[in-house]
Amino acid sequence: MYTKLSDRLMMIAEETEKGQIVADIGTDHGFLPLFLIESGIAPKAILADISKGSLEKARQNVENYIQSCPQEERTCLRKCFDFRLGDGLSVIAESEADTVVIAGMGGILMAQILLADLRKTFSFKRLILQPRNKAGHLMHILEKNGIKVEKEQLVREGRFICEIITAYPEAFPDRTYFSEEFPGFEYEAGERLFRENPHEIASQYVLNRLRIHKEITDSIVSGKSSDSESLGHSQAAIEYLEGLLKRYGQ
């Protein structure tokens, strides 16, 4: 019986290539690495977290699993799990993992983690990223730094639609690029969403973005806010998103 994963974590697991060593940055309870080892997808997993409490929870979950296995397998299984306490990629060495997973953090924070040591980031074969927000900013920064976005997938988790980005280092940049400025609507919600996802979930994602921008516009127009810059941005976003839905959505 494999560890039960949420649909979000299962999609991340499905993006992990068989036989690759995986580093799960911000592992929390360690469910993803547990599943990857149990199911034979990964031969080894590095479980990293900045929180000592979270890492201890992950360690206990792993130990509970190992104790449920036959006695003769336990020593070998323990060698499959490597626990690291620390911040971001600082806890792993260059080329120590094939695939790096970072999930559940903000997109800007993820970009900062990956850019902190770009040479180390380029030593990994695959990046699987699930930002809580600013996914468009993250993808823009990745591509500006020579990291190719291969997929942008959507998955439901409760009332939210989560984005899962699969990318790989392609061409080391001459200089590191980082900006929190808005990268363009095509990064926030582009044609790739409809190419790579079921029509229904891609349309719902765009409708959600459209609703948010309409609420911002209504708030400013009704006098609850006087942010003229946000008004212009949201009006442009509404025009773009409605055009995207007309071409690919509803």
Image (cartoon, rainbow, N blue to C red):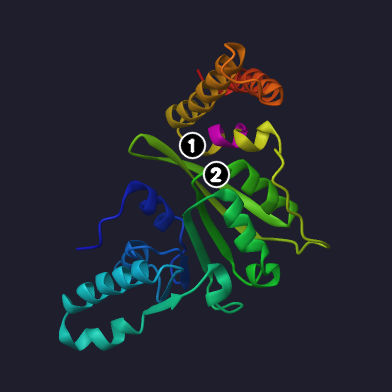
- N-terminal of the two: label 2 or label 1? 2
Quarter where residue 48 is shown: bottom left
The x and y percentages for residue 149 are 63, 50
The span shown in magenta is 190-194
Q: Which quarter of the rendered picture does the N terminus lie within?
A: bottom left
Residue located beneath label 2 in the image: 152
CA gap, disc 2 to disc 1? 8 Å
From this view, report whether residue 59 is shown above or below residue 226. Answer: below
Name the residue: 73% across, 48% down: 179
The x and y percentages for residue 113 are 60, 62
Task: Please say whether residue 141 is one of the residues in the magenta stretch.
Answer: no
Q: Magenta span: helix, strand or loop, mainly?
A: helix
From this view, report whether residue 20 is shown above or below residue 74. Answer: above
Task: Please say whether residue 192 is one of the residues in the magenta stretch.
Answer: yes
Residue located beneath label 1 in the image: 197
Side of 4 relative to 134 (left or right) = left
From this view, report whether residue 58 is shown above or below residue 236. Answer: below
Name the residue: 53% across, 69% down: 87
Q: Amino acid at mark 2?
A: Glu
Name the residue: 64% across, 59% down: 112
- Crowding near the residue tagged with mark 1, few <14, some 14–19, many ≥20 C-alpha atoms within 10 Å: some
The x and y percentages for residue 17 are 47, 63
What secondary structure is marked by label 2? strand
Would residue 245 be seen by someone viewing this image from the given angle? no
- Asked whether the residues under the numbered discs 2 and 1 touch, taking CB atoms below 8 Å apart as contact, a structural biologist would say yes
Question: So how many labels did they put on this image?
Answer: 2
What secondary structure is marked by label 1? loop
